[in-house]
Image (cartoon, rainbow, N blue to C red):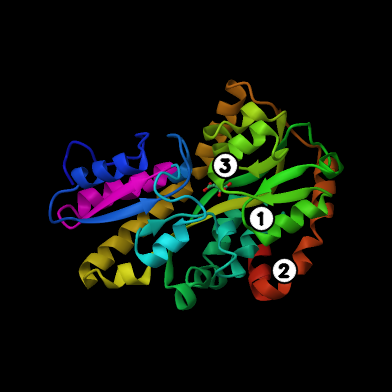
Amino acid sequence: MKKLNLVLTTLALTFSAGTAFAASACDPGERVVKFSHVTGGTTHPKVVAANNFADRINKEMNGKLCVVVYPNSTLFGDSKELEALLLGDVQLLAPSLAKFGSYTPKYGVFDLPFIFKDMDQAIRFTKTPEGKDLLMAMKDNAGFVGLGYWMSGMKYFSANKKLILPSDAEGLKFRVQTSDVAKAMIKAMGASPQAMAFSEVYGALQTGVVDGQENTWSNIYTKKFYEVQDSITETNHQLLAYLFMTSQDFLDSLSPADRAQFLAIADEVTQEANESVKAKEAANRANILKAGGKINTLTPEQRQIWVDTMKPVWKKFQGDIGENIINAAAGA
Ligand code: LMR
């Protein structure tokens, strides 16, 4: 990796310009490792963690590997990135755990409404035997390997009208990720879910294709969703976390020593990312308010109504996810 520029992430590159820049930023003889993701801005936890990982590899494995990060769906968006990993067109991804429904239903546990009180509980779950096993849930059927879980934040609803109770959402259309749990949750509110790629959400909110969405402070701020919504309600109803992942083929292609170094760096970057995620979320909440976004808070009684409305969703997915996994997460 040439010294002058290690990471491409903050550049607004087109697909072809990005590819050209990537090739020129790596030294001849270095193996280019493509890392594609869908988030943007400079303050987003995934952006920061992906850049850190690239920086570390490019410094510590200089001359061997050259990680090039493609943010903001510039290389592959939601609908193509997993297929690209299967085909070997990309080597690293960090999709939301809500986007793996076609590969495994087990990650539905991360989506169950109100299962995690906060990110600390989710991190504790990822360290249980059940949580660790889930890193490899897609190894046998797709050859996907989880390198670590990156927390992103708790999720909040926003809409083109003020939401205080679930009944305020009745009849509205909400954008969701491709998660069956999320779809069931929106239906439980008497609203309609519409699965859609992340890159399309701002436009869909702006033009009224959907009325609302659910996301973290970091996504709401960096994608400016607050500009096209009445307000955001601090529901805290669900977790957003990522599977930092690669393929078994890629890992097998590294020498044992290189693989060990690569995995050790992945581990350290994961820990660092999870230690700093709460501060990033808090900063982006403040950024939304500074930029003129409105945030509604709930009384404990109002929040309890959201909990009660969504709780029946758990039963529906118990069989697919596995009771042992749900119990480990709920009790973490
Ligand atoms: C979304 O699609 O809302 C998120 O998963 C995007 C992301 O990667 O944070």
Which residues are the magenta region?
A: 47-71
- Return the residue at label 2: 317
Question: Is residue 255 located in the magenta-colored stretch of the structure?
Answer: no
- Return the residue at label 3: 200
Position above or below: 175 against 12: below
Whole-angstrom CA distance, mark 1 to mark 3, is 28 Å
Rendered residue at 46%/78% (across/down): 140
* Residue 8 lies in quadrant: top left
Q: Is residue 157 visible?
A: no
Q: Could you say where residue 138 lies in the image, as x and y percent from the top left?
A: 49, 72
For label 1, count other residues whose C-alpha is less than 10 Å away and answer few (under 14), some (14-19) or many (20+).
many
Whole-angstrom CA distance, mark 2 to mark 1, is 16 Å
Q: Where is the C terminus found, in terms of image quarters?
A: bottom right
Determine whether the residue tagged by mark 2 lies in a helix, strand or loop: helix
Q: Give the residue type at disc 1.
A: Phe
Q: Nearer the viewer, mark 3 or mark 2?
A: 3
Q: Are marks 3 and 2 in contact (CB under 8 Å)?
A: no
- Return the residue at label 1: 116
Determine whether the residue tagged by mark 1 lies in a helix, strand or loop: loop
Q: Give the residue type at disc 2.
A: Phe
Which label's residue is closer to the chain start, 2 or 1?
1
Q: Could you say where residue 290 lies in the image, as x and y percent from the top left?
A: 58, 21
Position above or below: 90 against 132: above
Q: Give the residue type at disc 3.
A: Glu
Whole-angstrom CA distance, mark 3 to mark 2, is 28 Å
Q: Could you say where residue 253 lies in the image, as x and y percent from the top left?
A: 26, 70
Q: Nearer the viewer, mark 1 or mark 3?
A: 3
Which label's residue is closer to the chain start, 3 or 2?
3
- In the image, 290: left or right of 22? right
Position above or below: 143 against 50: below
**Residue 40 vs residue 197, the one in the foreground:** 197
Q: Nearer the viewer, mark 2 or mark 1?
A: 2
